[in-house]
Amino acid sequence: MKVIFLNILKINFFFVIIKKIIKRFEKNTSTEAKKWAKLNTKYTTEEFCKLIDSRLYHEILSDIISIEKEASEKLSKLSIKLGGGGNYILLYFLIRKLIPNIVVETGVAAGWSSLVILRAFRKNGKGKLYSSDFPYFRLENPERYVGYLVKDEINKKDWFLDIRGDDLAIPEILKKIGSNNIDLIHYDSDKSYSGREKVLKTLLLNISNRTIIIFDDIQDNLHFKDFITITKKDYFILEFKGKYLGIVGSNFILKE
């Protein structure tokens, strides 16, 4: 509790933490959301990737095994647990397949997703990652753990990281992107309904019909279900390590 209190007192942390606390009182629709996600899951990650490009999927498996080994060894040296990442297999595959110029991710934590995205950029020979995050405020000096897996080994020209939270970081990212479209968005930060909705509205002008959007943990609430109902977008839902993610915008890949 002492660590949490000291972090709350930090000017950069105070308002973000207060907003996080308030959002915990939003209506809980997780039971309904998980049931819906499970009923609408048609493919495993492996099946989905093979549907798009079977050859590429088999090609990346050795890279994935190497990344998993390196990351696990590095995390094992810490005295704390930082948690797992999103569906890094899917992310690595899609970056290799799409060869995007601009990728935006919300939620970095230990840096699993950042690591695979940046490694895929290295293979592709191009790409810029813009990341928004907010440190684990339950840890002492939590800033040092954000992107722990990538801080010492990735060329910083490929990566812009802002750890002030989405409300401040996303507008700053958009300033740097300018009028360019975002090729892929990986949403894995504030899992509240209102948090997801606000980030999407903020990014709207830089989202095109060819932008891939991946929403992690869609079982937490009905945001993804409502989103695809309102927008009429084609979508896929995949299960990964007991959780569910939703993908929109991927239909054009299947047609190519």
Image: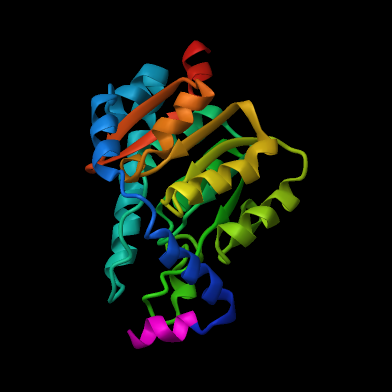
In percent of width and height, residue 172 lies at 69, 57
State the residue in front, 212 or 195: 195
Residue at 46% of width from left, 69% of height from top? Answer: 135
User: Magenta stretch: dominant SS?
Assistant: helix
Q: In this view, does 236 lie to the left or right of 19?
A: left
Residue at 39% of width from left, 31% of height from top? Answer: 225
* Residue 88 visible to the viewer: yes
Above or below — where is 179 with respect to 172? above
- Quadrant containing the N terminus is bottom left
Q: Which residue lies furthest to the top in this view?
A: 255
Total marks drawn?
A: 0
Is 180 covered by the magenta stretch?
no
Above or below — where is 154 with respect to 91? below
Is 7 covered by the magenta stretch?
yes
In percent of width and height, residue 184 lies at 56, 36
Residue at 26% of width from left, 37% of height from top? Answer: 32
Q: Residue furthest right?
A: 179
Residue at 34% of width from left, 27% of height from top? Answer: 58
Q: In this view, does 117 lie to the left or right of 75?
A: right
In percent of width and height, residue 189 lies at 46, 53
Above or below — where is 24 with respect to 45? below
Q: How is the image coloured?
A: rainbow
* Residue 148 visible to the viewer: no
State the residue in front, 216 or 144: 216
Q: What stretch is highlighted in magenta?
A: 1-8
In percent of width and height, residue 235 lies at 43, 24
Q: Is residue 57 left or right of residue 232?
A: left
State the residue in front, 212 or 8: 8
